[in-house]
Amino acid sequence: MCRVSSSEKGPVGGDDTAGSRVVAGRYRLRSVLGSGSMGTVWSAYDEFLHRPVAVKEVRLPPGVPPVQAAELRERTLREARAIAVLSHPNVITLHDVAREDDEPFVVMELLPARSLAGMLREHGPLTVPRAAAVADAVAAALEAAHAAGITHRDVKPGNVLVARDGRIKLTDFGIARNVSEATMTRTGMMLGSPAYIAPEVASGGAVTPAADLWGLGATLFAAVEGRPPYDADGDPLETVGRVVNGAVPRPAPGPLAPLIRGLMAKEPAARLSLQEVRRRLYPLLAQPRHTLFGPELFADRATSRAPDRIDGTATQVIREVPPAPAEPSAGTSTERSAEPEPGELATDPGPLPFAPPAPARRRAGAGAALLAVLLFLVAAAGGFALTRTVGAQPLLPPERPQRTSAPTPPQGELEARTGDATNLSGAKGGLFSVHVPQNWTSFVTQRADPGLPPSTVVQYVSPDGTQTLTVQRFAPFAAPLTVDDYRGALAKQWAPGDFVAVRETSLPDRDGVRLFYRTVERATGPGEASESQLGRSTFAEVFRHGTGLWVVAVTVPTEQERSGQVELFDRIAPTFRLAD
């Protein structure tokens, strides 16, 4: 769709109204920053507040019926409502919504930046530190959006802006929608960027926050490979067919490859969570962002790169669906080709990709072969038992020695830090101070955990990403959240057997409890042979303050459980102070 950037200007010629056209009596349009099938973004000047702004003007695709045209205009107002509730450093700020001749105009922050798509087109793939910084910023923006109930639905390089000072922002929530509202997309009318759209969305399934996880993975793929994950020479229908039915492309080996595979899983439930993505990115974020993106990345230069290789997959309205594959006739092979033909965008596609079960075959002598195998196994087991008995050795293998607790890496001195856990609506009462190891990095985001209201989270993370201090604040709500509510919802966030409550005691000086529990984090990337597991131990204080609820927690690998409590939690928790 469109970009809100002040360094990648499109041509202004052909529009004589530029410079003289004023919207809502105050926003003077100057030049076109970018345009697409859904609208045009102008560089403008707010003559009331005397500041530059970006103004998005809706432009409908040709031939759209009046009813659908009204729906698409309503999407612009949805964009305003969606962005208005977001207050996050990695999200473009919305200033105003204006109407001119009954058409909506969205007024937004004008960021002196260029899109990631333009950067890749001009300079090729990003280095690992640069790509990691982009991924972390986009993940943080999506965390805030999902906590507010918003699905972006069009995450791609063209919607990621990078500024010279290292600021990275996600923009263009033009087809974002609040999940509490009914979708307006009708069968046969799909909005999105074919090369970056999630398979379940491309096939007509429900749009969930998991679709943004795929978009993040596809964007990260483009950042490290210099090309989109899917590209059918600009043909959107064929590209969508490959997304739905084709194999997921694999990135080249590297530090970010497991993340990309974990995000680009065709089954939405198998994708890595944003929290896990950011945790894995922490060790790669040592360099400050303002030093990562040098001036050479913002200088345009002649290039032979074709624009559609990076971002020609602009947001599109696709009116026709790819034809369903013809039924095989008698005597025709049913084997899949290496590159499947595009499939129909079904309303209920079922699991993806489709793979019909192979017909069972009966072979003569199968029963005899099975009997022979069983006899061999019985004979081998008997021989093993006889050998162990004659040698006076036990039949069972010796027990493995228990692992000893790994020491916590040296932490050095603690230093006082101040933080702000103010919630999205801007309510006061979120300031605090706490002592943290000097070399730990802080991150702020919003979270919506199952069974709990939205919260603001301030995390301090060790350089290797394995240890975290979490300060979480649930702001006052109509029905105050209690310690029992939090404790009950905590266990429900984990699969059966992956959460173990070890100990709970009352806090002597606060209305709350001290918790100690263990969890197991599981992740399986596409193509990985086995599931990876990570045991973690958490020590937390959960207490009420006024009508809000606070959580102060230290999480370490289970191997560092004892030293993590003594060297970290027992030293840090007593230093936590609220500013009010």
Image: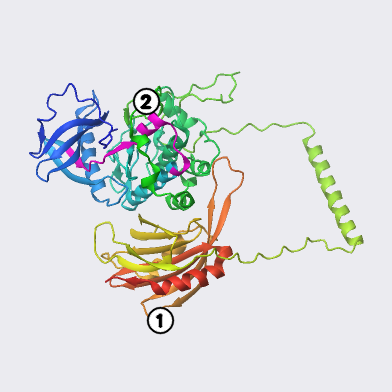
Q: Position of residue 148 (x, y in %)?
A: 31, 52
Disc 2 to disc 1: CB gap under 8 Å: no
Instruction: Determine if residue 101 is in view.
Output: no
Q: Is residue 296 left or right of residue 547?
A: right
Q: Quadrant of residue 75?
A: top left
Q: Bounds of the magenta span?
A: 105-129
Give the camera-side residue of 487 and 13.
13
Q: Say which residue label 1 marks.
A: 508
In percent of the image, x 30 and y 50: which residue is there? 89
Give the camera-side residue of 151 and 110.
110
Q: Earlier in the sequence, mark 2 or mark 1?
A: 2
User: Is 557 contained in the magenta span?
Assistant: no
Q: Position of residue 138 (x, y in %)?
A: 37, 45
Name the secondary structure under disc 2: helix
Instruction: Determine if residue 219 is in view.
Output: yes
Q: Say which residue label 2 marks.
A: 307
Q: Give the amino acid at mark 2.
A: Pro
Q: Position of residue 397 (x, y in %)?
A: 78, 60
Q: Quadrant of residue 102?
A: top left
Mark 2 vs mark 1, foreground winner is 2
In percent of the image, x 35 and y 50: which residue is there? 146
Work out whether 574 lies above or below 493: below
